[in-house]
Amino acid sequence: MNGKNWMKTWIIFFIIVGALAGAFTYLIDPYGENYYFNKRGINKIKIRQDERQLKFDYLNDNSNYTSVILGNSKGAFLDPAIIKHYTGLEAYNASFSGGIMDEFLEYTKWLINNRNIKQLFIVFEYFALSEFVSNGVMPPEFRKNNHYKFNYISPSKLIDSMKTVLHNILNNKEVGNEEKFYLDKGMRYDPSYFEIKKSIKNQSKHIEDFKAKEIVWHGKQISEIQINSLKEIVALCKENNIDLFLLQTPNSYLKLNYNNKENYKRLLSLIKSIAKEIHPVYFFNDFNYDVGKLILKKVFLDEGIGVKIAPNNIYTIDRLIKLK
């Protein structure tokens, strides 16, 4: 075989290998860019994916809910069963890590257009209305106008595709249990929380570990885009006769006292502005499963911890700001 034939052979070989690699990474879709092929045990869980897609799949595949919780990771700890206890409505917790207001708006539009919901909870932290950019990947149903960049032949994407398949194979059983136990309600479960409650020693260790953690406040400046997203959510709920509840997620006393309470003051000012100009806000300041029950007790019975901030009691926030 002469040199030209060898060159042709190698060119054809690399074209075939490149095509196979591209097809493989396209189908495995490690970053959640197309969702053309999405199977449990193969590529259901993506390298850069959080619970957004899994929970949207539930919302899309089921229609037995009329109350929905949209929020960040803390919001994911609210038990929908408590909402049903107080209202009789079937509820689902669609909260996800790093949730911000423009994401909640897209879900709200989808729910209004595709489901008959009567009640909506928006559970937020300060960062949800700031310049903070979520690192989550929104479901493709919310990215229909996006043009995919078909760069599926990069070595790094090929490696991540192989990692995705391996991860899904090794964790297939756990994913199945998660879908059955976790996605059925949408709320998060942390077994260690209940173990800590059983032991004073574990509680002390948990407190020490918590104090040792770095305190982080995501987001600095309020974003006009996110504020407008909130206003649009409020308007859509009003137009469609949906009861809307805004819940500011609690923070630990360590976080509230961080940076000479400057971040806390900004949070209080934000809540005051929302309550005065947009919609009443339920304001809380600490969180665990037990507090989650009390939060919803406040919402439905006006009992227990927290306070509903509305135009008629804005002075409550003014008083808190002065105390800080």
Image (cartoon, helix red, strand yellow):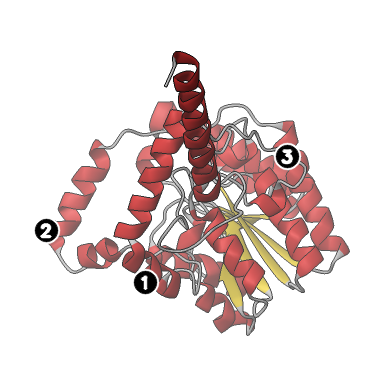
Q: Is residue 135 above or below residue 190?
A: above
Element under disc 2: helix
Q: Is residue 302 visible?
A: no
| Residue ranking furthest to the front | 1
Of residue 234 and residue 59, the one placed in the foreground of this image is 59
Instruction: Find residue 131 and report its image quarter.
Output: top right
Contact? badges 3 and 1 (CB < 8 Å) = no
> Would you name the residue on which mark 1 appears?
177
Instruction: Tell me how far mark 3 sits from mark 1, CA to CA.
Output: 33 Å
Q: What residue did someone put label 2 on? A: 201
CA neighbours of label 3 inside 10 A, class few (<14), some (14 to 19), many (20+): few
Sort mark 1 into few (<14), some (14-19) or many (20+) by Cα contacts within 10 Å. Answer: few
Which residue lies at the image location 41% right of the left edge and 74% below the top edge? 181
Q: Residues within 10 Å of mark 2 (few under 14, many from 20)?
A: few
Q: Is residue 102 above or below residue 264?
A: below
Mark closest to the chain's N terminus, 2 or 1: 1
In the image, residue 94 sits, relative to residue 261, either above or below, namely below
User: Which residue is rendered at x = 84% and y = 54% of the image?
Assistant: 235
Query: Picture coordinates of residue 288 (x, y %)?
Result: 38, 60
The residue lying at 32 percent from left, 68 percent from top is 173
Q: SS of the residue at dot 3?
A: loop
Q: What residue is shown at x 62% (from left), y 33% (from top)?
A: 130
Q: CA distance from mark 2 to mark 1?
A: 30 Å
- Residue corresponding to mark 3: 146
**Residue 236 occupies quadrant:** bottom right
